[in-house]
Image (cartoon, rainbow, N blue to C red):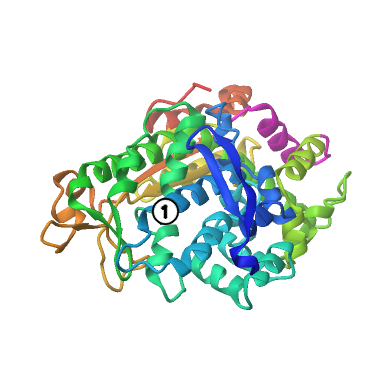
Amino acid sequence: MAYKDEQLHEEKVFKDPVHRYVHVRDRVIWDLIATPEFQRLRRVSQLGTTNITFHGAEHSRFNHSLGVYEIVRRILYNFRGLPHWNDDERLLCLCAALLHDLGHGPFSHSFEKVFKLDHEYFTQAIITGDTYVHRILERVRPGFAKDVADVIGKTYADKLVVSLISSQIDADRMDYLQRDAYYTGVSYGHFDMERILRVMRPMEDQVVIKSSGMHAVEDYIMSRYQMYWQVYFHPVTRSAEVILTKILHRAKYLYENNYTFKLDPTHFLSFFKGKVSLKEYIRLDETIVYYYFQQWQDEEDAILSDLCERFINRRLFKYVDFNPNVQLQELMRLQVLFQEVGIDPNYYLVVDSSSDLPYDFYRPGEEEERLPIHLLMPTHELKELSRHSDIVDAISGKKRTDHKLYFPLDFLEEKGAAATEIMEILSRQGEIDYAD
């Protein structure tokens, strides 16, 4: 029997709090899960610093990846025998679903911003490079690894296959919304996934939704909207991300200026130099980053030491609402005042902005063109969702942005009268958030 067709002697299952069970029958999938590259995802958190706000959010990219695989497995089971679906693509879809987050690094997005990295690039590099994952995929057939990478990179010829992994209603989003809601303990991310899976239909270039399932999709979109603003963009979580980002910036700055670390930052050197090999990238996970942060608390550099101590012990920055686009003069004055009282504004006065577009229809030529969600009407006509749903129409194309100004209130209080003007300016922006 060809490797691609091999089945396990008995079905393997992972007990899962979101989907109850993750089912594995294919030998290829079982072998991929066992690779070092996939097991590494156990040591990369799904939600970065969110556990500092929601203490239950300790889940990893590993169990999210299994969840996305399970949703795709169930979708494909429902697609069997339907027009427009080619079952020869089944294993390709399952592998792409399982491996779609393989290239995420520690504290994913914060890490990427500092070192100008792209997790999708590294996902494809792991799949097509000299790795255990690549060797398993090539056993399926020559070129299969590239096809998996192309699906994840959204360049694969069959756009229906791509849409299962990456679209405005895909398996990735359906898993992380429910999983993140479960582990954070909030109710916002719950929606009727069972109903959505039942009304999904394959078309030539994307998955569409039977019109009878429109209300379940409305619920899904609103769940996504609420999760972004209540969980993903929570200002306390963002405070931790600000400190995390500044730690990495400071360590990089010190290295570039020949600072002598007590503990040589061996695992970071290639990142500081901007020449990261695939092997070095895979070696770095959050357990190693936390180790360095623990050690850097004892560094001679006061800024690095303080920022690490804040991050490790949850001594976060406070914040006020602040729009740098209309309050530039206030920001510039604050920067001067911070310097005058001996607080470096490059590390201790930070504007952070978050924005999200919950749903949009196709706008040719725009950046990040989005394939819309289509409803399959009883007449077999396709209608774009927002043209048929008043709820979705109300939020379509409406990008919401939130700005916060973060600062160490404890430092300012220590300065006493010297920080009076600073406190007056901050207070004029609105109430300072004193909560932890």
Give the amino acid type for the residue marked by disc 1 in the picture.
Answer: Tyr
Q: Residue at x 74, y 70 (%)?
A: 130
| Closer to the camera in the image, 207 or 357 | 207
Residue range corresponding to the magenta coloring = 298-316
Q: Which residue is at the front of the view, 21 or 279?
A: 21
Q: Residue at x 45, y 53 (%)?
A: 72
* Residue 163 falls left or right of residue 250: left
Q: Does residue 186 sit above or below 114 in this rendering?
A: above
- 307 magenta-colored: yes
Q: Residues within 10 Å of mark 1 (few under 14, many from 20)?
A: few
Q: Is residue 339 visible?
A: no
Looking at the rendering, in which quadrant would you find the N terminus?
bottom right
Kindly identify the residue that appears in the image at 46 percent across and 73 percent down: 155
Query: Dominant secondary structure of the magenta stretch?
Result: helix
Q: Evaluate whether residue 365 shows in this view.
A: yes
- Vertical relation: 99 (above or below) 239: below
Q: Position of residue 364 (x, y in %)?
A: 27, 72
Query: In the rendered image, which quarter is residue 195 located in?
Result: top left
Residue 261, given in percent of the width and then of the height, sits at 86, 47
Q: Is residue 30 magenta?
A: no
**At 79% from the left edge and 39% from the top edge, which residue is drawn?**
291
Closer to us: 31 or 107: 31
Spot the residue most to the left: 379
Secondary structure at numbered mark 1:
helix
Please name the residue that numbered disc 1 is placed on: 77
Give percent across and percent down for residue 365.
30, 74
Q: Is residue 207 left or right of residue 266?
A: left
